[in-house]
Amino acid sequence: MRRGALLMVLMGIVTASAVPLRSTDSRVRQYTRNLEFDFGQWTLDAVLGEFGQTSLGASVYLSDARRAQLVRDYLHLVDQIHAIQTDLEDIYGDPSISDPQAAAGPKRAELAALQAKRDKIEPVAESILQEQVAVILDQMGLGQIGSPFPPVAFHFSTLPKALIVSPRDEIRQEVNIELVPDVSLTQEINVENNIETALDVSALVVPIGGIGTYPTMVQDSTSLSWVLEVVAHEWSHNYLDIRPLGINYDTNQSLRTMNETAASLMGKEVSRLALEKFYPDLVPPPAPPPAASPTPPAPTEAPAFDFQKEMRTTRVHVDELLAQRKIDQAEAYMESRRLIFWDHGYHIRKLNQAYFAFYGSYADQPGGAAGDDPVGAAVRALWKQSRSPAAFLRSMAWLTSYDQLRVKVGGAPTNP
C-alpha cells in the first residue's frame, strides 16, 4: 500500500530533460500541438501496470537463476522481433516483390505471435530488473531500510522523440518537447523548418533512450548492459528531482549538464555492478595491458577516424564562431563537418546548435559534443574525488550552481 501511494504521488513527476522548459515553448507549440506525446495517459497506464506487478509479485517465487534466465528470454524475444520488423521493411521496400502484402503475411503472423509472448513476460522481466537495480543501489548505500528512495520503477515503452530548440547565437537548450513515437521523417523535417523560419532559432528532432517520468520510460533493447544503464540513469533523475540539483534542472545549461552527466556516470556504474552480480558471463573482458615496449605503428595507414575527438573539434570551433557573432559562418561550418562525419559512417542528419545543446549535456566522457565546456569535466572530477558513487550523488544533489561545483572540486568559481 505504501508503494502504491508513493506511485500515485510521484506519477506526475517528470524530469526537466523530458518536459517543455520555458515560456518560449508556447510559440514553438504552435507547430507541435498535433504531434505531442500524451504523458498523462502513458503515466496512468504505467502506474496501473506497476500496481499489477506489485500485487502479483511473480518474480518473488523464482530462483535467482530462473529470474536471470527470464530476463535473457525477454531480450531474446526482443531481438527476434527487431529482426522480423527489419525483414518486413525489406519486403515492402523490395521492388522485385510484386505483392508485398501477401509476401509479408507469414512474417506478420510470426511477429504477432512473438509480440504476444513478449507482452506476457514483459511485466515480470521489468519487475526483476527493477529489483536487481534496487539491490545494487542499496549495496551502494543509497537504500533506506533496504530499498532505494524513490523505489526503482520503469516500464519498457516505444519512446517519443524530442524536439530540441536552441538559439542560433549560442548553444543552449531552450525548449524540449516530446513528440509521438511514430512521427514521420517528413513531419520531423517540416516541424524543424517551420520553427526555424518563424522563430529564427535552431531546431532538431532527436531519438531518446529513456525519460525520467515516474515510472520511468525505457526503450526496449537487446543489450542488457544498456537497459540496466538507462534504468539506473533515469532513477538517478528521479532521485535528483526531489533535491535542489534536479529541481533547478531548467535554470541554465550548466545545471542541465550537471544533472545529465551525474545520471550518466551513475547509470554506467550501476550497470557494470549489476552485470557482475547477476549476469557475470556478460561482463566485457578487461582491456589488455599495454605492451612493455610499445613500437610505434609504421606510417602506412591513415589514423582511424576518432568520432569523439572530431566532434569535440567541431564544437570548440562552433563556440568560437558564435562568440564572434559569426552565426552564418558557424552554420556553414557545421554542415561541412556533418558531411565529413557522414563520409566516415556517422550518418548525422542535421548538425546544428540544437544538436550540441542536446548531446553536449551528456559529458560523462571527455570530448565529444560537449567540446571544452568545463562543466562536464568538473562533474567527472567530483566523481573521481568521491569516496563512493553514493557520496558522489549525494554531493551533486545539493548543488545549485556550477560555481558551487567548482569550489567543491577545488577550482576557482567561474561562470560558463
Image (tube, rainbow, N blue to C red):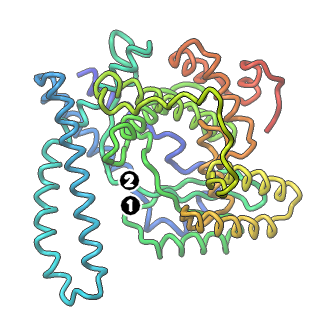
Say what amino acid the circle numbered 2 marks: Leu
Q: Residue furthest top?
A: 145
Is residue 142 rendered to the left or right of residue 311? left
- x 29%, y 87%: residue: 95
Q: Quadrant for residue 131, please give it.
A: top left
Residue 247 visible in the displayed image: yes
> Compared to 116, does 244 lie above or below?
above
The residue tagged 2 is 159
- x 83%, y 31%: residue: 414
Q: Quadrant for residue 415, please give it.
A: top right
SS type, badge 1: loop
Is residue 15 rendered to the left or right of residue 132? right
What percent of the width, then of the height, locates residue 127? Answer: 23, 32
- Of pointers 2 and 1, the one earlier in the residue sequence: 2
What percent of the width, then of the height, locates residue 27? Answer: 61, 64
Query: How far apart are the two marked residues, 2 and 1, measured between alpha carbons?
Result: 6 Å
- x 68%, y 45%: residue: 370
Which quadrant is the C terminus positioned in?
Answer: top right
Q: Which residue lies furthest to the bottom in this view?
A: 98
> Compared to 341, does 52 lie above or below?
above
The residue tagged 1 is 181
- x 31%, y 26%: residue: 280
- The crowding category of the residue bearing disc 1, from other C-alpha atoms within 10 Å (few below 14, some 14 to 19, many at least 20), is some
Say what amino acid the circle numbered 1 marks: Pro
Which quadrant is the N terminus positioned in?
Answer: top left
- The crowding category of the residue bearing disc 2, from other C-alpha atoms within 10 Å (few below 14, some 14 to 19, many at least 20), is many
- CB atoms at circles 2 and 1 under 8 Å apart? yes
